[in-house]
Image: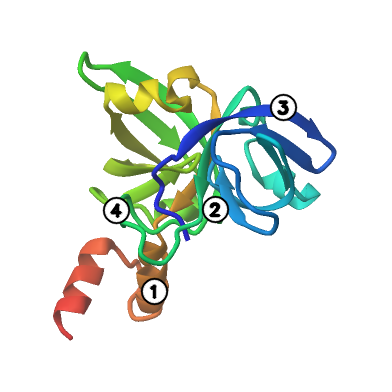
């Protein structure tokens, strides 16, 4: 489990076949789980100041591999007793999102991200979503897209500062939204989150 709060930006040294080697201040142990751009990966080698994780061919088909260059988001798995912030992130990327609009509002920037329609049902206004491993709040849910408002601090300290229209990102919807939707989807046709609220209020 992760929180979606980035521990540091790790430097990509190489990506050869299935092995991604990174330089970072934080050095995990062999066998540790670590989220790289939001994907939970296993550490297979550790050297002085560097470590290597393995990306299966299947993972490389699913992930936005164009973002595994230069710098990447890195978050170690949570440990018992860690302070819990962000939201519960599994490190299981659901799908790729595509940035379709970037609008600077002065003290914040709106990003609109499209996604496959079958995953938009798991997005809730003011709920949580993970973009390349960063825990964020959904402001609006649109037709097969959603809007995020990002503050300057987040942009300057994450990959958001290099994202452009057309950039693809790893996207993980909120675990609880997926569970709740699947619990109630057979209770009523055309299930919406308003209907879910009414169903839950009846219990």
Label 2: element kind? loop
- Lower position in the chain sequence, tag 4 or tag 1: 4
Question: Would residue 116 be visible to someone looking at this image?
Answer: no
Where 88 sits versus 38, above or below? below
The alpha-carbon separation of the residues under discs 3 and 2 comes to 27 Å
Q: Which residue is mark 3?
A: 13
- Lower position in the chain sequence, tag 3 or tag 2: 3
Label 1: element kind? loop
- Lower position in the chain sequence, tag 2 or tag 1: 2
The alpha-carbon separation of the residues under discs 2 and 4 comes to 16 Å
Cβ atoms under marks 4 and 1 closer than 8 Å: no
Classify mark 4: residues with Cα within 10 Å, few (<14), some (14-19) or many (20+).
Answer: some
Q: Which residue is mark 2?
A: 94
The alpha-carbon separation of the residues under discs 4 and 1 comes to 15 Å
The alpha-carbon separation of the residues under discs 3 and 4 comes to 37 Å
User: On residue 185, which mark appears?
Assistant: 1
What percent of the width, then of the height, locates residue 59? Answer: 71, 49
User: Which quadrant of the view contains residue 72?
Assistant: top right
Label 3: element kind? strand
């Amino acid at each position: 489990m992760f929180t979606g709060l980035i521990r540091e930006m790790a430097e990509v040294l190489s990506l050869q076949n299935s092995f991604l080697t990174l330089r970072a201040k934080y050095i995990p142990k062999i066998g540790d789980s670590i989220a790289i751009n939001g994907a939970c990966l296993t550490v297979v080698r550790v050297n002085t100041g560097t470590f290597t994780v393995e990306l299966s061919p299947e993972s490389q088909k699913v992930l936005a591999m164009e973002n595994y260059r230069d710098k990447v988001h890195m978050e170690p798995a949570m440990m018992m007793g860690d302070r819990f912030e962000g939201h519960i992130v599994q490190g299981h990327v659901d799908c790729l999102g595509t940035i379709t609009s970037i609008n600077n509002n002065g003290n914040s920037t709106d990003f609109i991200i499209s996604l496959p329609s079958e995953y938009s049902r798991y997005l809730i206004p003011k709920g949580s979503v993970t973009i390349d491993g960063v825990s964020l709040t959904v402001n609006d849910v649109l037709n097969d897209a959603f809007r995020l408002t990002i503050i300057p601090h987040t942009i300057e300290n994450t990959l958001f500062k290099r994202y452009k229209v057309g950039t693809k990102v790893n996207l993980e919807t909120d675990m609880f939204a997926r569970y709740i939707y699947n619990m109630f989807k057979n209770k009523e046709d055309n299930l919406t989150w308003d209907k879910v609220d009414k169903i839950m209020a009846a219990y």
